[in-house]
Every structure is written in C-alpha cells, then in structure tokens.
Image (cartoon, rainbow, N blue to C red):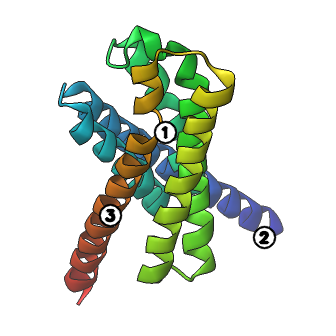
C-alpha cells in the first residue's frame, strides 16, 4: 500500500515536470518566433519582454528565466542580434532573468493582484535597465549608439512588454474563467 502511494506520487511529479517542460518549450518557441519575424526592435523588444513575463505568469519564474537566458544566444546565433552586441549577451541574459525574477517575486508577494503585477513590471523593468545600462557604462566597451540602445530604450521596452503581458494574461485568465462557468 505504501509502495503504491509512493509510485503514484512519483508519477504525479513526472507529469507535473513534463507539463512544465512542455509549456516552457512552447513559450520559448513562441518567443523565438517573435524574434525571427524580422520586425523592428521597437516591436520585437516589447514582444519578447511580454513573452518573458507571460512565461513567468503561466509556467513560473524559473520557466520565464530559462527562456530569458536562451533568447539572446539564439538571437545572436540566428543573426537577429547584431555582432557588435555580442559582448552584451551575458548582461542581456542576466537582465532578462532579473526582469522575470523580480516581476514574479513582487507579483507573488502582492497575491497576484493587478497592482502587484504593475509594481512587479516596474520593478523588474528598472532592475533590467540598471543591469544593461551599468554594463555599457562600466563593464563592456561598445560604440556610443549601442550604449545608448542598451540604456533608456531598454527601460521603455521592458515597461511596454510588461503592459502587454498583463493585458494578455488578464484576457487569457478571463477567457478561462468564463469557459469554466
């Protein structure tokens, strides 16, 4: 009897892990699809940030952070991220992960209320901005146009992506609720 319970619990754990992995992979694929559309940065940047935050909402902070770590490398390998930005990849990875982790921590601390989501977006965006702007100011030597692109525009891109993510998540959650009723 005890052994049966243990096997059942192990099977449930495997199912949860497989569900998480599948959802994370689908969200990574969608995020990469946005990157590969070849749209201008003012469209692609917010879309990618929105996908990172949507991933955090629907698969958790770890899933969103994992996606945020992969996207700069894949964008670089595919030629979407220009070669002069290569030295920034580790900082973009850290910035993406920080955006997701800070957003998730603040949102979860506020019991997922709308104000907590908004506060999480602002806090995460500011932390990402500080990481990227500090990197181009103190660590990585890049040309001035690249340095400028890694500063204030990144804050606006993350904030815009956050607004999109909260709107989309709200719409998805409302649709799921209405379908249950």
Which residue is denoted by mark 2 in the rendering? 1
Please tell me how many numbered marks the rendered image carries.
3
Residue 57 horizontal/vertical position (percent): 45, 63
Locate residue 152 relative to residue 7 in the image: left or right. left
Q: As displayed, is residue 91 above or below residue 5?
A: above
User: Residue extending furthest right?
Assistant: 2
Name which of mark 1 and mark 3 comes first in the sequence. 1
Of badges 1 and 3, nearer the viewer stands 3
3D distance between C-alphas at marks 1 and 3: 19 Å
Q: Residue at x 58, y 27 (%)?
A: 136
Query: Which numbered dot is residue 15?
Result: none
Instruction: Judge the density around disc 2: few (<14), some (14-19), many (≥20) Cα neighbours within 10 Å.
Output: few
User: Residue extending furthest top?
Assistant: 83
Residue 75 horizontal/vertical position (percent): 38, 21
Q: Nearer the viewer, residue 91 or 27?
A: 91
Of badges 3 and 2, nearer the viewer stands 3
* Quarter of the figure that contains the N terminus: bottom right
3D distance between C-alphas at marks 2 and 1: 41 Å
Name which of mark 2 and mark 1 comes first in the sequence. 2
Name which of mark 3 and mark 2 comes first in the sequence. 2
Of badges 2 and 1, nearer the viewer stands 1
Which residue is denoted by mark 3 in the rendering? 163
Q: As displayed, is residue 77 above or below residue 164?
A: above
Query: Which numbered dot is residue 67?
Result: 1
Locate residue 40 relative to residue 49 in the image: left or right. left
Secondary element under disc 2, as helix, strand or loop, is loop
Q: Residue at x 40, y 31 (%)?
A: 149
């Amino acid at each position: 009897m005890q052994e049966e319970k243990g096997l059942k619990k192990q099977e449930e754990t495997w199912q949860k892990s497989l569900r998480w992995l599948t959802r994370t992979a689908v969200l990574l694929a969608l995020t990469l699809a946005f990157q590969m559309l070849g749209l201008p940065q003012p469209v692609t940047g917010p879309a990618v940030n929105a996908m990172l935050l949507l991933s955090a909402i629907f698969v958790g902070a770890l899933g969103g952070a994992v996606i945020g770590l992969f996207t700069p490398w894949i964008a670089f390998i595919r030629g979407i991220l220009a070669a002069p930005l290569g030295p920034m990849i580790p900082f973009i990875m850290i910035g993406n992960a920080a955006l997701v982790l800070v957003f998730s921590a603040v949102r979860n601390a506020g019991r997922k209320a709308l104000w907590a989501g908004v506060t999480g977006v602002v806090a995460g965006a500011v932390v990402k901005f500080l990481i990227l702007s500090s990197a181009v100011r103190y660590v990585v030597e890049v040309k001035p146009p690249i340095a400028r692109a890694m500063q204030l525009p990144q804050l606006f891109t993350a904030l815009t992506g956050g607004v999109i993510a909260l709107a989309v998540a709200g719409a998805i959650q409302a649709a799921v609720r209405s379908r249950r009723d």
